[in-house]
Image: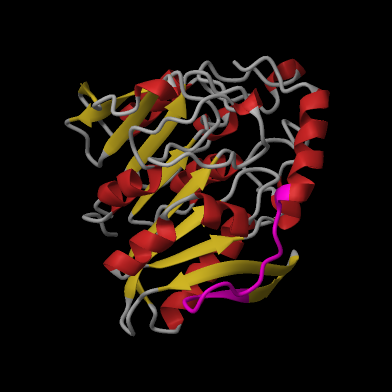
């Protein structure tokens, strides 16, 4: 391939679940280019939304994974992937997590009931395989991006399914400690995007429950782990212009230097558990100020696609 959070209070998790019940939308066809696909798996029926602007040829595929207690429809409406797909001829798949969560390699109950032991790796391999078999997708240009718990699944995919993806992006997510001990295969080009004031995926990491179960690394340790994995010699930083001073946040991009495959960290100073976007967007997990600030100097999907587009497997 070329390529310590102190724990989320139970009251907050309860509020997340109650608020998400009003945010999650049914998975139905929406728009001429968007449809629903279903798969029968060992875990039961699995679904995804597909926005297809492939123009009748094998096209690049971007898989976008929602946050815990989110949905495929919510992440589709909250990011700009459909507009990018229409402009650049992509196919974008938005899979739905079983019971709205993903199996991100942490123990059940580490933060929320984590993925119900679903075989999400097999599900996503099946998703890609079916689209390739239909002649819709260029198998060398398959990419994955995820938010929050979906971002933690991205790390797992980068460790366990790197043969599938040309590049990956983990947003608002730090690396599960369990993956540090068990990250196999060739490294995949990786982008990380993290806010210093994120209450749900803290910049400083999460020590987990007693004995370290469910622990995640800090954002800096996550970046350091992948610098070593990617054989980088160091890192170089550049500031992004602060176009929207009223958002209370700034972005510094840290680029792995001399790496075997690309590595990039977006350090969002003052950013919360909100996906950066040029336009104010509703939170992906729950409404209100509890999630912190949304940076509006960059558009996350545009930054990710700029990172992905010249990479292939």
Q: Position of residue 193 (x, y in %)?
A: 41, 33
- Residue lying furthest left in this view? 258
Q: Is residue 140 visible?
A: no
Quadrant the N terminus occupies = bottom left
Q: Residue at x 41, y 22 (%)?
A: 246
Q: Which of the 4 image quarters holds residue 84?
A: bottom left
Q: Residue at x 43, y 36 (%)?
A: 276
Left/right placement of residue 232 relative to residue 272 reads left
Q: Position of residue 135 (x, y in %)?
A: 38, 83
Up-down relation of residue 242 to residue 46 (above or below):
above
Q: Which residues are magenta?
A: 23-37
Q: Residue at x 36, y 39 (%)?
A: 191
- Residue lying furthest front in this view? 246
Up-down relation of residue 86 to residue 149 (above or below):
below
The prevailing secondary structure element of the residues shown in magenta is: loop
Left/right placement of residue 35 relative to residue 44 reads left
């Amino acid at each position: 391939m070329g390529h310590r959070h102190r724990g989320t209070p139970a009251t907050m998790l309860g509020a997340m679940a109650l608020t998400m019940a009003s945010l999650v939308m049914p998975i139905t066809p929406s728009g001429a280019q968007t449809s629903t696909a279903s798969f029968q798996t060992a875990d039961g029926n699995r679904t995804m939304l597909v926005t297809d602007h492939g123009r009748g040829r094998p096209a690049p595929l971007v898989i976008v994974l929602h946050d815990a207690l989110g949905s495929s429809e919510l992440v589709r409406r909250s990011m700009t992937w459909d507009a990018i797909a229409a402009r650049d001829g992509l196919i974008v798949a938005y899979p739905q997590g079983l019971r709205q969560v993903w199996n991100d390699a942490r123990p059940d109950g580490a933060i929320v009931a984590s993925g119900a032991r679903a075989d999400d790796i097999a599900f996503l391999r099946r998703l890609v395989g079916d689209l390739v078999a239909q002649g819709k997708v260029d198998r060398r240009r398959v990419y994955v991006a995820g938010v929050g718990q979906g971002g933690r699944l991205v790390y797992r995919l980068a460790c366990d399914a790197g043969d599938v993806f040309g590049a990956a992006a983990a947003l608002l997510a730090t690396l599960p400690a369990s993956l540090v001990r068990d990250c196999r295969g060739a490294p995949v080009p990786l982008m990380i995007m993290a806010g210093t004031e994120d209450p749900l995926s803290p910049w400083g990491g999460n020590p987990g429950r007693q004995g370290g179960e469910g622990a995640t690394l800090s954002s800096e340790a996550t970046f350091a782990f992948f610098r070593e994995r990617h054989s980088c010699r160091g890192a170089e930083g550049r500031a992004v212009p602060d176009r929207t001073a009223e958002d209370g946040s700034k972005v510094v991009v840290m680029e792995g230097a001399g790496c075997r495959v690309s590595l990039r960290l977006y350090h969002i100073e003052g950013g919360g558990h909100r996906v950066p976007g040029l336009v104010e967007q509703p939170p992906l997990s729950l409404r209100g100020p509890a999630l912190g600030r949304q940076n509006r100097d960059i558009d996350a999907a545009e930054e990710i696609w700029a990172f992905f587009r010249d990479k292939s497997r």
